[in-house]
Image (cartoon, helix red, strand yellow):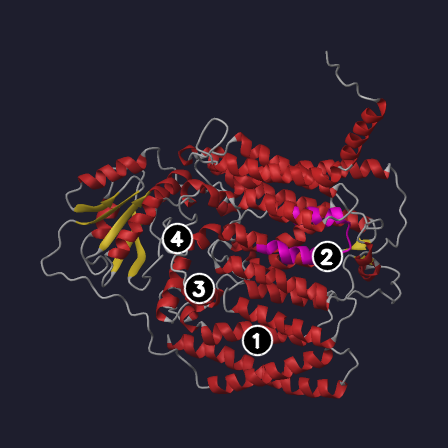
Amino acid sequence: MRQKPVATPGAAGEQGGRWARLLASAPRWLPVLLVLEGLVMYVLAVKAPPGPYWGVDPEEINGLGLISALPVTAFAAILIMVVSFFVTVAQSTDRKFLLLFQIAAITFALHGVGALVAEEPRFPTAYIHAGFVEFIGRTGETAINIDARMGWPGFFALFAFVTKAAGIEDLTPILNWSPLLSNLLYLLPFVLILRQVVATTRARWFAALLFILVQWIGQDYFSPQGFTFALYLVFVAILLRWFGRVEPRTKPIPPKGLRRLLARLDAMTPGELANTGMFRADKLLMLMLLLALFVAATASHQITPFMMLGVLTAFLLFKRTSLTWGLPFFLGLVVLTWISYMAVGFWVGQIDTIFGGLGRVLDNLQTNTGDRIEGTDALHALVLQARLGILVVILALAAVGLFRRLHRGVFDRAALILLCVPALALAMQSYGGEMGLRIYMFALPGACLLAAYAFFPNMPADSADVREETVPLRKRNVRFNPDLTRKISLVLAACMAVAFAGAFLVARYGNEKFERVTSGEVAAMHHVYEHDKPSARVVYLVPKLGPEVTPTLPWGERDIELVNFAGQAQVFKDPTNITGVIDSLKPGPESPRNTYVVVSRGQVSYLQLNEGFPEGWGEKFRAALDAAPELKRVFSNDDAALYTWGKFVRGTEIPDPRPYKVQGEPTSPWTPVGIGALAVTWIALFGYEVIRLNGPRRAPRARRWMLAVAIPAFAVALGVIVERFVYIAGLN
């Protein structure tokens, strides 16, 4: 008989040592394993055919949104990825690439789930933006009289050029993945911003994670706002990294009063890193990039350049940039010039609409808060309240973080500026009730950074990345065991991150029942495009007639100059009352041939969740339309139907579309003088800023000459801009 080999004590000890070394190295490989496991688990959970523990069935989506249809394994996968992140953060070394990958994985899970489960790109407004791109690529022109957004065509023209150069004919993949790609793009400049603050590694990366977890407002779809927000973050990153200014206070502190309080704040340890010095050529290059970013934002969106300008001005006021006061005047003139000269078709005849909200802070606040948290569906009301709850929590954490940093003798001016400056936009106008969303979006960088300090407020005295960090100047008495408080802070931060991840899914995808676009709805719109020669008119459903109502439809993807989407049909909670549809289709000057009423799943869901329409209303309403002798159904599927007037007078022709070309922009007598003054002002102010890059004492005579030329030229240019508003508005 063969005897079994007997393990020697030496072999057993060697095997035990191998296991001990493996366990000892767990902090290196465990986070990688966890995040990869979470990613694979998440994709399988979302993309698998619907079952008890995996797969997403869109029919299960209710008033809570997409979260009601997500399987339990998807939540487990997100939890695993969050745990992986905190396992890495708990280590003493700054594993930058791993942390960035972990945050990117969490971003994919939260911001990419819409693209993973959608049969068509979600969010109806993205389709009209694709239509603008298609129109510019096809005609080579913009048409502000078709839509006011075409007065800021930078974003659309850029994608028209890219798609045409690359031979891209279908924008569907770009529309589908824009939210995920946008948020991944936001991460890069935000991480660069975080590299310029005096904070621990844990605080920096937790702020980056928070930035992903609380960015629920959904302005990252294929839109100029999503694009220019990335430009805004790069703008701020350049200001801090290449033009940051941190100087210790040398003046004595006054004995009492408000000046003493302000002086004590000024004397605290700066929360930002000082610029270590650069070559003049590098500074000049970054200054030109700063100007290019601002011009691109000005040409693409109405609000973003004002946010950029506000942050720059605040940095100058609070002495956090080495740039001069000439730059805000330079950039402010860029914005006013674009509005006055390039967007005339937008403001002509709408002066009261544009400037009517100036100074009405309380009215704008009500429009952007109270009016946006109303809802009739009980579950959907929870979604709206959850959004407000996230806002309250993140602001409360930011306040706690600011207090804890002040308690340690650190004053974070830059973070406070980034948080507070966007709120000034409430004094402008309500922006169709969406200014609050824009303010929240632009305030997020500062809010997330200060909120991270609520958990990790200490100065980075023992960081592995000490070359870019500073040791605290003040010695504080420690009441508790530092190791214990660090562990407690880490656990609390992890719990808050998990709570925010769950709240994000509710807040971000709570409108999924009507923001989700189906193939049937897209097919209905394509039927219109196939029959829009020479023109067509689409009427959508509204609970009450009025302006500024965006259709809950994938509208305007093609032929925006041929199809008019301005028609409205009033509907009532009684599905048999179709008088509004009859009135909207009855032949007349406002309802020519080729007019369609569209009934879609998204519109019906919106009416049920937000207007209290009863369950089953859509089926009964379509049945009533089918039974109406005056109407004719020309297209139908499970998700959408199109109706037209049944009979027209013989010989009635389809009208030609409204011409999108204008005979020329209106001008004023002083416009040529204003253009010349603009050129002189910009050249003089740019020269002043370039000379100033060498230092505050270089070429003082040349800088005085530059200012002597720029100031009167600026006054003339500004006067002509005012004259254009008064003169052209008076003509119209």
Amino acid carrying mark 2 in the image: Arg
User: In terms of secondary structure, where does tag 4 sit?
Assistant: loop
Q: Mark 2 points at which residue?
A: 195
Q: Mark 3 points at which residue?
A: 166
Secondary structure mostly seen in the magenta stretch: helix
Measured in 3D between alpha carbons, the distance from the residue under mark 2 to the one under mark 1, in whole angstroms, is 32 Å
User: In terms of secondary structure, where does tag 1 sit?
Assistant: helix
Residue 715 % position (x, y)? 59, 82
Q: Which of marks 2 and 4 is in front?
A: 2
Residue 289 % position (x, y)? 62, 71
Vertical arrangement, residue 542 with respect to residue 37, above or below: below
User: In terms of secondary structure, where does tag 3 sit?
Assistant: helix
Q: Name the residue under label 4.
A: 550
Dot 4 alpha-carbon crowd within 10 angstroms: few under 14, some 14 to 19, many 20 or more: few
Asked if the residue under mark 4 is in contact with the one under mark 2, i.e. CB atoms within 8 Å, the reply is no
Indicate the quadrant containing the N terminus: top left, top right, bottom left or bottom right.
Answer: top right
Measured in 3D between alpha carbons, the distance from the residue under mark 2 to the one under mark 4, in whole angstroms, is 40 Å
Measured in 3D between alpha carbons, the distance from the residue under mark 4 to the one under mark 3, in whole angstroms, is 32 Å
Residue 198: within the magenta? yes
Q: Give the range drawn in magenta.
A: 185-209
Q: Mark 1 points at which residue?
A: 333
Counting residues from the start of the chain, the first of labels 2 and 1 encountered is 2
Residue at (61, 67) in percent of width and height:
309
Is residue 572 or residue 319 the one in the foreground? 319
Amino acid carrying mark 1 in the image: Leu
Amino acid carrying mark 3 in the image: Ala
Would you identify the image quadrant in which residue 599 lies? top left
Dot 3 alpha-carbon crowd within 10 angstroms: few under 14, some 14 to 19, many 20 or more: few
